Image (tube, rainbow, N blue to C red):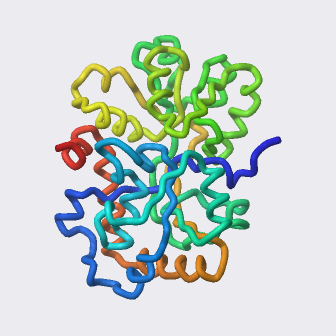
Amino acid sequence: MKNPSYLRYPFFVAMIVLGGVVSGGLFPGMSAYGKERRALDDVHWLSPDVPPIGIGRGPLAGKGLHGGIVTVLSGKPSEENNVESHANVARLFFQMQSGNYCVPGMVKTEDRAEHVYFTEHPTAILDSSHLIYARNNQKLRASITENVSLADLMAQGFVVGIGAGVSYGGGIDEIIAPYIEKGSVISHPMANFIGPILSMVEMGRVDFFLAPPWIVTWRFVEQGLNSHDDPAHGILTHPFREASTKMHYFAACTKNAWGQQIIDLIDQLLERPEIEKALRQNVQAWMSVPNAREHFMD
């Protein structure tokens, strides 16, 4: 039986605020917007343990996309935020329905809106999925044109790697679905599936992976690589026809009176031009390996 869409992980859900940029004064100080931020002090935030959306361990712990959003909204360093990582989104939704919780960002759908409240204003506007593939996959590269179609690639027998339970939205799930039983879709079961699937791409076990282009940046930074190292040049990215140009993500809270109050307060913050500017500018740190290394690596 197919899981309802609200249980499928909204793969690209949020933006990041980086310590170096924050310390440079791009987001408002803690003294600003006191009422809204005092209310947010009591929010228990939930974040999927899927780097770079949520990073729960290692040298980049707390510096993921969700941690950045909470930092901007609360006006506090990410290590002071009450953010709990979860292995999967199904568990996250279960917990949201059992108590008062919020998620910094996720795709808004009618199905999900039946279970949680969403902000009116987005917390993130990000690039949608690209094809992530190995430079040495000559057969696939010959089939990738300027206006390449995911449906055409699947019809040709190429194998795609995805995260188990992930929703890629916008009709993409429907393109992939018929090929699951044919063995053309490799679904990785781990919550932190980005690294393993990229390794499968590099080894040729799958032809391509669906992810935003900046997802690769996290892998290289996490491994301590420079942009000119061979592994960085071994992975290529390319947009495909069926993916939307941009995807919007919104904060979500438990669907009760408390959740509605918090959502209203978050929307008030998101209307502030300083907040919007901080969220928009800081995402640029994930757009290239050098930028990310500058902000994240010692």
Q: Residue at x 73, y 26 (%)?
A: 179
Which residue reaches farthest bottom? 35
Q: Is residue 91 above or below residue 102?
A: above
Question: In the figure, 107 relative to 242: above or below?
Answer: below
- Residue 49, image x, y percentages: 49, 47
Q: Does residue 149 show up?
A: no
Asked which quadrant contains residue 195, the reply is top left
* Residue 97 in view of the camera: yes
> Considering only vertical position in the picture, is 254 above or below 35?
above
Quadrant location, the C terminus: top left
Image location of residue 117, percent across then percent down: 63, 71
Left or right: 238 as drawn, with respect to 172: left
At 29% from the left edge and 83% from the top edge, which residue is drawn? 32
What is the x, y in percent for residue 275?
35, 72
The residue located at (63%, 30%) in the rendering is 187
The front one of 200 and 271 is 200
Q: Residue furthest right?
A: 1
Does 93 sit left or right of 81 as displayed? right
Which quadrant holds the N terminus?
A: top right
Decide if residue 26 is on the left or right side of residue 143.
left
Count of marks, rendered view: 0
Q: Is residue 28 above or below residue 204?
A: below
Measuring from the top left, give residue 250's x and y in whole percent: 53, 64
The structure residue drawn at horizontal position 62% and vertical position 64%, both measured from the top left corner, is: 96
Q: Is residue 168 rendered to the left or right of residue 79?
A: right
Nearest the viewer among 108 and 261 is: 261
Q: Nearer the viewer, residue 120 or 251?
A: 251
